[in-house]
Amino acid sequence: MKVGIVGSGGREHALCAILRKSSKISEIFCFPGNAGTSTIAQNIDLDANNFEDLKNFVLKQKIDLMIIGPEKPLVDGIVDYFEKYKIKVFGPSKIAAQLEGSKIFTKKICQKYKIPTAKFGIFQNKIDSKKYLEGCNYPAVIKADNLASGKGVYICNNQKESDTAINEIFDGKFGEAKNILIEEFLEGEEMSFFIISDGKTFKCFSTAQDHKRVFEGDKGKNTGGMGAYSPSRLISEELEEKILKKIIKPTILGLSELNSNYRGFLYAGLMIVDNDPYLIEYNVRMGDPECQTILPRLKSDLVKIINSCCDETLDKTSIEWEDKKSLCVVLCAKGYPDSFQKGTEIPNLSNILPDTGDYLFHAGTKKKDNKIVVNGGRVLNFVSVSNDFKTAREKVHKIIEKVNWTDGFYRKDIGYKVIN
Ligand code: AMP
Ligand code: GLY
């Protein structure tokens, strides 16, 4: 069968590489993909936000299944659009994608179904927001309601910082703001928890721990993710049961009462406080870099799993995992998450031949005159699957040293909570 993947990051290269292992796949198209996907699939230079051009290509090429990687096209309704043209597509509908598209939508579901989450208030203007904070303890968490590419969250330690956050959000830094969300700060350990759903049944799709801050020791600015490991050290049968009962099942119920059955990957960003889960946010897709560290542990055929979600037969499909530890380190362009240089060459990549259990997934790369050049801040993902996290990290570091890219940097402490 022919499969199309929308997106251009490390997540999409990982999806592409793991799908490639399936004997059912004849051809993969990436819209637009990166230098990594171009070696195992056909990159199509179409804008992922131009649904009409995508649809025309998909129909012309008779692509059997479309998989949507990033949140923006999902929140903008690409699934509803493709379905109008009878294109088989894996991902949630526009209504369900509001779980990521509007933090306030999610908070209202939490309120209605008593899902544990940080206490919060919703405000419509600067004056009311600032007044509310007068009686609150710091740190306070202030969030823009809409999609903000991971940048609309402020952890404020004092009034000066909260004033800045409120002003920036209402002044339109993340688009027009009718509302703002102010939350209590939860202290605990974060975990990324995934399920996959066909709209009738869902199954767990493993866990991971992301490292969002740019510098070692979890210091510096938030990024899209500097590395991850899977599974999370926190997960246990008891905790999984709590997460499903208190968070996932009531959310799925809430969506079904809005006449929207959830189909796709669902990523719950959780804070675990004293072995109890609190929902921080939902994402309506796989995480990046969580996807890169989770998928290499999958033993079952990914295309079979995704197809069964589109055909509502997930209940008959088994999902098996390697009982191993996987760790991913992201190599970034110097300057990220602020400004960095695009177009510089990444040398030595042709010398990198990963061993079995090692993976190199491209993210912000593209091919130019037969060279691989930087096209985004998070550039390459190095993953190793091993019997323990320490060995996995050592293998990853050895490969990165071979690349020896002087314009790049990476966190050397990914997985520090699971490695002495
Ligand atoms: P979000 O985009 O909602 O995932 O927020 C980005 C990051 O901010 C999260 O990964 C957490 O590290 C942090 N964060 C968000 N909300 C809270 C909260 N209520 N308490 C503590 N940390 C939070
Ligand atoms: N790794 C965080 C995210 O994908 O949103």
Image (cartoon, helix red, strand yellow):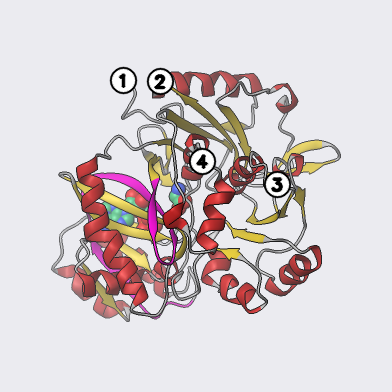
**389 or 118, which lies in front?**
389
Kindly identify which residue carries mark 4. Answer: 300
Name the spot of residue 389 as percent of width and height, x first.
40, 24
- Residue 108's image quarter? bottom left
Identity of the amino acid at label 2? Lys
Label 1 to label 4: alpha-carbon separation = 32 Å
Image position of 360 (left or right of 217)? right
Sort mark 4 into few (<14), some (14-19) or many (20+) by Cα contacts within 10 Å. some
Of the four image quadrants, the one with ligand 1 is bottom left
Task: Looking at the image, tell me whether mark 2 or mark 1 is earlier in sequence order.
Answer: 2
In the rendered structure, which amino acid carries the disc numbered 1?
A: Asn
Q: Secondary structure at mark 2?
A: helix
Vertical position of residue 118 compared to residue 105: above or below? above
| Residue at 65%, 74% in the rendered image | 86
The residue carrying mark 2 has its beta carbon less than 8 Å from ligand 2: no
N-terminal-most mark, 3 or 1? 3
Q: Is residue 157 visible?
A: no
| Pointer 3 local density, CA inside 10 Å: few below 14, some 14–19, many at least 20 | many
Residue located at (37% from left, 80% from top): 258
Q: Kindly identify which residue carries mark 2.
A: 390
> Is residue 362 magenta-colored?
no
- Alpha-carbon distance for marks 3 and 4? 26 Å
Q: Which of the labelled discs sits on residue 34, or is there none? A: 3
Residue extent of the magenta highlight: 176-205
Q: Earlier in the sequence, mark 2 or mark 3?
A: 3
Amino acid carrying label 3: it is Asn
Which label was assigned to residue 420? Answer: 1
Disc 2 and disc 1: Cα gap in Å?
Answer: 8 Å
Quarter occupied by the C terminus: top left
**Residue 229 place in picture, x, y as percent:** 42, 35
Identity of the residue drawn at 86% across and 40% down: 369
